[in-house]
Image (spheres, rainbow, N blue to C red):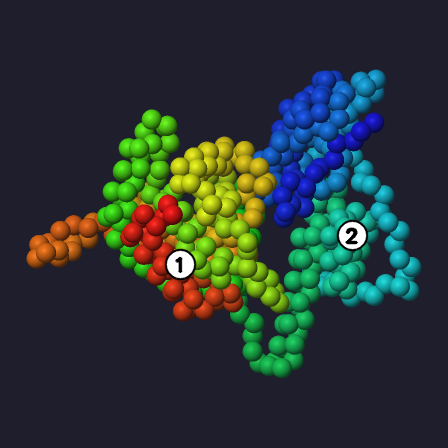
């Protein structure tokens, strides 16, 4: 009987949460039918069937977090139908696949985890392959780590926490030995909800976004701002929309900025790059991410090959992707592969802000609102719409002069909008 397993639905996914069953036990199933909705670290995705038959078993209940590769359902001929799993989380899982045999005691190098990590005396250990590799590489004994996953399964996060606690313990011990009079800094106590406070659990998208943005703070950032005269750009947009009125397509100021960034990135390939650890990665394609705020958190759908697409195509794709992002229906390939990101808060009346880099990209552009500024022209004081754009840069990839040249040319492109469409 074919088993339906939890698939890898994103490049950073380790496990998914089954948020809703769309097929019930006993329902006929055809290849390609959507069986359930899976909440990943990026969005809510569809779990599709790869076989025809009848849904005979649901192995997990709604709300259960399931590691990649673990069975969640069984499709058969309908002769072995079993009632859905109990609503109790403890009985919602199927037993994990047999673990590979443990190495003999003499072959294991063990460093005892810090005493603050509780000891889990169960056998065999339930772990993910990534957790096992991470523990081996860092010389940690998995038996000394408490698993936070389903039925005590040890996840990558558990191993990372154990590594962090061990390193922190060693660091404190070394510091104490070198400077015994120095007291460690006080650690703020976690915030406790008062009576009447509302506690809102973090969804997967917001939790992963917070983790990734925290990682971004380890990147050495610098910022630079340019003031753009968008008088001609606004007029150009009005002219384009008049031409496109019959097609139903409408170009926004942000669409023009995205296209302008694509043209500038094509001329400055060193900015269309990312940090590769021991090398710089210069990307062949100009793929621009567009930051979209949703009720579940910030997501960044990507316009692929933006430098080779017409302005009207960029406008149509942006509208569609933003709509599906807010509905939580983006596909994995629509959120991956970005090489540069544009974040626009102008519609909220924000004049200027700095955006946090979306790793592993080397830069992100923050766009403020177009506001009228008094300018003397031919001896008269006139109001001219000006726009502030701020570039956040990974200093490991770009130096100040290189980033400044890119921002200078981007400003010139936006002020001479015919260059956007050539």
Q: CA distance from mark 1 to mark 2?
A: 48 Å
Q: Residue at x 66, y 31 (%)?
A: 47
- Badge 1 local density, few (<14 within 10 Å), some, or many (20+)? many
Task: From the top left corner, tell me how far across and down residue 134 is, in percent.
Answer: 73, 58
- Residue 104, above or below 248: below
Judging by the rendered image, the residue that carries numbered circle 1 is 391
The image quadrant where one finds the N terminus is top right
Q: Residue at x 70, y 38 (%)?
A: 7
- Identify which residue, 84 or 362, lies in the foreground: 362
Which residue ends up furthest to the front in the rendered image?
Answer: 422
Q: Residue at x 81, y 65 (%)?
A: 110
Choose top left, top right, bottom left or bottom right for residue 161: bottom right
Q: Residue at x 67, y 46 (%)?
A: 14
Secondary structure under the numbered disc 2 in the rendered image: loop
Task: From the top left corner, tell me how far across and down residue 119 is, in percent.
Answer: 77, 55
- Identify which residue, 268 or 145, lies in the foreground: 268
Q: Is residue 328 left or right of residue 229?
A: right
- Residue 72, above or below 374: above
- Residue 63, above or below 234: above
Q: Is residue 76 left or right of residue 107?
A: left
Q: Is residue 93 visible?
A: no
Task: From the top left corner, tell me how far across and down residue 391 is, in percent.
Answer: 40, 58
Task: From the top left corner, tell me how far across and down residue 284 is, in percent.
Answer: 55, 54
Q: Is residue 13 left or right of residue 290?
A: right
Judging by the rendered image, the residue that carries numbered circle 2 is 120
Comparing labels 1 and 2, the label whose residue is closer to the camera? 1
- Identify which residue, 8 or 170, lies in the foreground: 8
Say whether disc 1 or disc 2 marks the residue closer to the N-terminus.
2
- Badge 2 local density, few (<14 within 10 Å), some, or many (20+)? some
């Amino acid at each position: 009987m074919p088993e339906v397993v939890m698939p890898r639905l994103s490049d950073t996914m380790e496990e998914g949460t089954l948020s809703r069953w769309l097929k019930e036990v006993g329902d006929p199933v055809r290849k390609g039918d959507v069986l359930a909705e899976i909440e990943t670290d990026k969005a809510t995705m569809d779990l599709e069937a790869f076989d025809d038959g009848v849904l005979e078993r649901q192995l997990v209940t709604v709300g259960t977090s399931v590691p990649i590769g673990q069975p969640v359902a069984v499709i058969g001929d309908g002769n072995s139908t079993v009632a859905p799993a109990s609503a109790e989380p403890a009985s919602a899982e199927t037993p994990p696949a047999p673990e590979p045999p443990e190495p003999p005691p003499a072959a294991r190098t063990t460093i005892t985890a810090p005493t603050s990590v509780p000891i889990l005396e169960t056998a065999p250990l339930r772990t993910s392959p990534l957790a096992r590799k991470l523990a081996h590489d860092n010389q940690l004994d998995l038996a000394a780590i408490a698993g936070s996953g389903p039925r005590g399964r040890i996840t990558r996060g558990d191993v990372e926490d154990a590594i962090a606690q061990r390193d922190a313990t060693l660091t404190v011990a070394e510091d104490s030995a070198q400077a015994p009079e120095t007291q460690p800094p006080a650690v703020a106590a976690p915030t406790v909800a008062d009576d009447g406070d509302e506690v809102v659990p973090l969804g997967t998208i917001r939790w992963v976004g917070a983790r990734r943005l925290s990682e971004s703070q380890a990147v050495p950032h610098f910022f630079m701002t340019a003031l753009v005269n968008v008088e001609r750009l606004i007029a150009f947009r009005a002219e384009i929309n008049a031409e496109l009125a019959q097609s139903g397509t409408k170009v926004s100021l942000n669409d023009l900025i995205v296209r302008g960034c694509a043209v500038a990135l094509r001329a400055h390939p060193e900015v269309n790059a990312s940090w590769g650890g021991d090398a710089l990665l210069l990307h062949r394609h100009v793929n621009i991410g567009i930051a979209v705020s949703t009720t579940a958190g910030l997501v960044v759908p990507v316009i692929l090959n933006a430098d080779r697409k017409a302005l009207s195509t960029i406008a149509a794709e942006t509208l569609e992707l933003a709509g599906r992002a807010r509905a939580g229906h983006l596909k994995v390939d629509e959120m991956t592969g970005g090489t540069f990101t544009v974040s626009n808060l102008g519609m909220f009346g924000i004049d200027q802000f700095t955006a946090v880099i979306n790793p592993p990209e080397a830069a992100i552009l923050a766009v403020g609102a177009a506001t009228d500024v008094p300018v003397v022209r031919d001896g008269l004081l006139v109001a001219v719409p000006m726009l502030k754009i701020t570039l956040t840069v990974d200093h490991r990839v770009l130096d100040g002069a290189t980033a400044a040249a890119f921002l200078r040319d981007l400003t010139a492109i936006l002020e001479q909008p015919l260059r956007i469409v050539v």
